[in-house]
Amino acid sequence: MDIQRPVQQQPSEQSAAQQPVQPVPVVARPSQSNWKVIILAVIGILILGGASYGAYYYWQTQKLIDANKPVACTQEAKLCSDGSSVSRTGPNCEFAECPADPTADWQTYKNDQYEFKYPSKVILTENKNQIVLNHKIPYENHGSCDMKGDSKTYPTLDDLNMAIKVIDNPLVKTVQTLSPYLTEENFVGDSLVISPGFIDEYKNGVLRGFSIYEGAEGCGDRKYYFPVTTTKTLVITNEQVQMLSGIIEASIRNEVLKVPGVISREENEKIFNQILSTLKFTAQ
């Protein structure tokens, strides 16, 4: 028996024409003008980024330069309690730290005109209007200014001896009275003429005045004159210790320096300046 297979019909031209046509996707290409905009935008971003980085780098570099750049501080100075002074320093021009106060545990003397501090090992005595500060060591000697040919022997040696008093006279008249050997050329108006090594200017704390060396061969004293008012002068005398001066041979001087508790010439000057640095006037 023959089996009949269905015959597959080919689509006719008409049916094929009736089928919907699938659209072909079209890729839009940027025009030449759009490319220019994109390129310019990228260039702009690069320029802006480079400029920002350059500005940031310059700012950081300038900060580093400014941080390391020396600062010109004013020439002001702060007086410390030990008589020394410190200046402004650092990027903020702040005063440097003062040394620790060496007079913190010193004793205080005060009267109706002035006050000051002094070390406890120094003996203070009052004699009318004069204050005397003294320190002795056990050492036999023939006096402060004559170490030979004197039959008198003293059991102790003054290694510090200073006196403080206020005189009711103006500066020039006081100097002329206490130092009568000065000539007219040593004065100008109501002040003194500086002569280095002889008449020197002296400043310490609130004190502003002059010092005059009076002595020879390691003995004598140095007088300090400070005008308190137009009619009053503060006079401070510091006696020179011949046994500790350069005029005495080294072997004898070294013997003295071996005595326990001795105040050397350098320490004498240091203590003297520290005492003056603490002096303040209580009335004028």
Image (cartoon, helix red, strand yellow):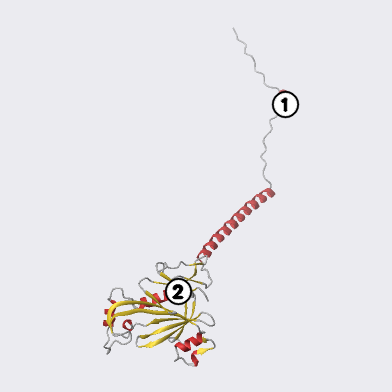
Q: Nearer the viewer, residue 267 or 46?
A: 267
The residue sitting at 62% across, 52% down in the picture is: 45
The residue sitting at 57% across, 58% down in the picture is: 56
Res 166 label = none
Provide residue 112's location: percent of width, then percent of height: 49, 74
Is residue 110 toward the left or the right of residue 47 in the image? left
What is the three-letter code of the residue carrying label 1? Ala
Q: Is residue 116 above or below residue 32?
A: below
Is residue 152 toward the left or the right of residue 5 in the image? left
Mark 1 vs mark 2, CA separation in Å:
122 Å
The residue sitting at 48% across, 86% down in the picture is: 174
Circle 2 is placed at which residue position? 277
Is residue 128 toward the left or the right of residue 18 in the image? left
Provide residue 111's location: percent of width, then percent of height: 46, 73
Instruction: Name the residue at the top extreme.
Output: 1
Q: Is residue 217 above or below residue 279?
A: below
Circle 1 is placed at which residue position? 17
What is the three-letter code of the residue carrying label 2? Ser
The answer to whether residue 134 of the structure is visible from this angle is yes
Provide residue 241's location: percent of width, then percent of height: 34, 82
For the residue labelled by badge 1, is the local secondary structure a helix, a strand or a loop? helix
Q: Nearer the viewer, residue 255 or 281?
A: 281
